[in-house]
Amino acid sequence: MKIRMIIIMLCWSSGLIWAQQSIQPGNIINDYIPRVKIYAALFCGQAVTPYNLRYENHPYYETKSYLPGTLSYNQVVYANVLMRFDLYRNELSVYHPDRMYEIVLDKEKFNYAIVNGSTIILSDDGNRSKGKFLVVLHSGAYPVVRKYRVLISEKNIDQTVRRYFDTKNQYEVYVNGIPRPVRNKKTVINLFPDRKRELNDFAKQQKLDFKGQLEHSIIALVSYYESLKK
């Protein structure tokens, strides 16, 4: 995946958004409705299919509510689009507040989205992750991303079957454009054999906790390696 090129595009397009579309303060829905006609291209697709069973939790990224964000779709950048990321179905949908319906975005046209401070991209590498939505955690020379594995599990409580979504976070570091899975200190350090000693020393000095704070520790170690290479 050409992830570094995507990050460059994000930096360039963020200035373009505000130059083309000035978002006025106020209620997000009131701001959004007048733009629906301009955003018509977003609402030509498959409707979201509701879940037909009852679950103890939800499968969405951070919240089940639609959140406003920036969307690049078919090479056009839209501001203040209401979006929701379904981790189980690996779908990103948009909400039409005027007509009150939800549309699943076409992955072939999706470029990136920024929702609640998180950048979401679509993997295009040749392994089993192809077509998976990823969250960019670190956009340096060696990008770090989070992806998701979601299963439906069941538990029996008081003779009643309760279903819930079991979400597992997985992490990858891109080295020379190739995603490499990481899960602990050893797997991160093994990506950079030329600086193993320095990385081990840094992890000890900073007391990086790869069990309790895995995400933070991965990013800290990768960032330190990037500083050594400058």
Image (tube, rainbow, N blue to C red):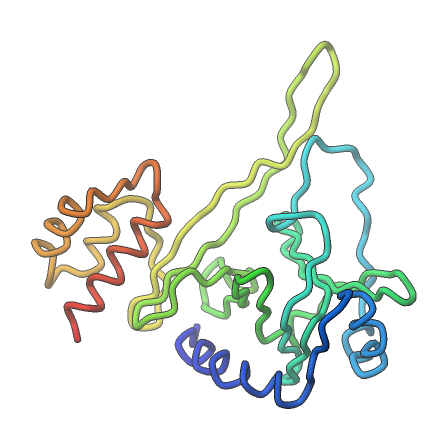
Of 51 and 20, which appears nearest the observer?
Answer: 20
Placement of the N terminus among the 4 image quadrants: bottom left
Q: Residue at x 69, y 83 (%)?
A: 22
Q: Left or right: 104 with respect to 115?
A: right
Q: Left or right: 193 with respect to 141?
A: left
Q: Quadrant of residue 51?
A: top right
Q: Residue at x 32, y 51 (%)?
A: 182
Asked if residue 57 is positioned above or below residue 5 in the image, the reply reads: above
User: Residue 153: x and y, percent?
Assistant: 62, 30
Q: Residue at x 53, y 62 (%)?
A: 117
Q: Quadrant of residue 228?
A: bottom left
Placement of the C terminus among the 4 image quadrants: bottom left
Q: How many marks?
A: 0
Of 80 and 186, which appears nearest the observer?
Answer: 80
Q: Left or right: 100 with respect to 127?
A: right
Q: Quadrant of residue 195?
A: bottom left
Q: Residue at x 45, y 55 (%)?
A: 146
User: Residue 143: x and y, percent?
Assistant: 36, 66
